[in-house]
Image (spheres, rainbow, N blue to C red):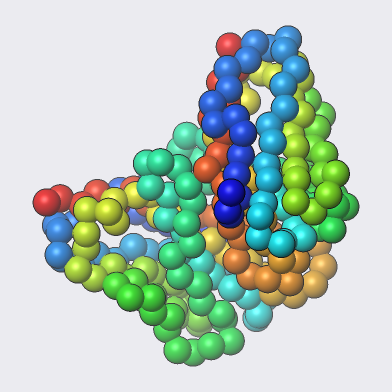
Amino acid sequence: AQTVTQSQPEMSVQEAETVTLSCTYDTSESDYYLFWYKQPPSRQMILVIRQEAYKQQNATENRFSVNFQKAAKSFSLKISDSQLGDAAMYFCAYRANAGGTSYGKLTFGQGTILTVHP
Amino acid sequence: ETGVTQTPRHLVMGMTNKKSLKCEQHLGHNAMYWYKQSAKKPLELMFVYNFKEQTENNSVPSRFSPECPNSSHLFLHLHTLQPEDSALYLCASSQPWGSEQYFGPGTRLTVT
């Protein structure tokens, strides 16, 4: 079974600084997606960034980028120039891209609460 | 309305009550999901529907009964719940072949 582990329950960063959130996963699949979701205090879960396992290039979305290390099964999120609005719970998630019973299922990590200090 | 909507946003119910949670997606998706989010626990997938057919029941107790009348609507019928069922219930949708899931704002359920 796939598992996703976020080892940092809480992180904090100063406004305008850079922070990296860690995520590791375990799978026997070779074709899958990885995601970072953000859940602000208002609770709406928002997709931040996604990475396709077959792509070696790390995904980037504006101030958000990932460091995808497939062999190490590591998928960290870097937030540059942190803003107050970045404060939220961040979830790492995994989804197999093969058919079968696991198709479409997202497996989430435990989440990391990010605090941004002005 | 756009995206995924959920009603009600807050619900307090007694253990003997029967209530329903509603989810509606306006994204043209054909897969819908129910998740349970409890404090200090990862999100737990409860049910998956693809093209109105249930394709996943993650060992959810029978006091939770899902219904998917069409690809845009998903319900979660609740009856004789326990206090430990108090949680945030999230609905999501996606294309069955698509990678991203889009989430609603959730229903905060409190069982007294």
Q: Is residue B62 above or below residue A32?
A: above
- Where does the image place residue B67, in percent across and percent down from the top left? 82, 39
| B17 w.r.t. A62: above or below | above
**Residue at screen point 65% across, 81% down:** A30
Q: How many marks?
A: 0
Tell me where residue A27 appears, x and y as whole percent: 62, 69
Closest to the observer: B9 or A94? Answer: B9
User: Which residue is at 67% across, 51% downward?
Assistant: B25
Q: Please say if A58 is above or below B6.
A: below
Observer-nearest residue: A61 or A67? A61
Residue shown at 48%/62% (left/top)? Answer: A47
Which residue is at the far left? Answer: A118
Residue sitting at the far right: B53
Residue at position x 40%, y 41% in the image: A42
Tell me residue A106's x, y (percent): 63, 59
The quarter of the image holding the N terminus of chain A is: bottom right
Visible in this render: residue B101? yes
Q: Nearer the viewer, residue B92 or A72?
A: B92
Q: Is residue B72 left or right of residue A2?
A: right
Return the residue found at the far bottom. Answer: A56
The answer to whether one can see residue A102 in this image is no
**In which quarter of the view is residue B62 placed?**
top right
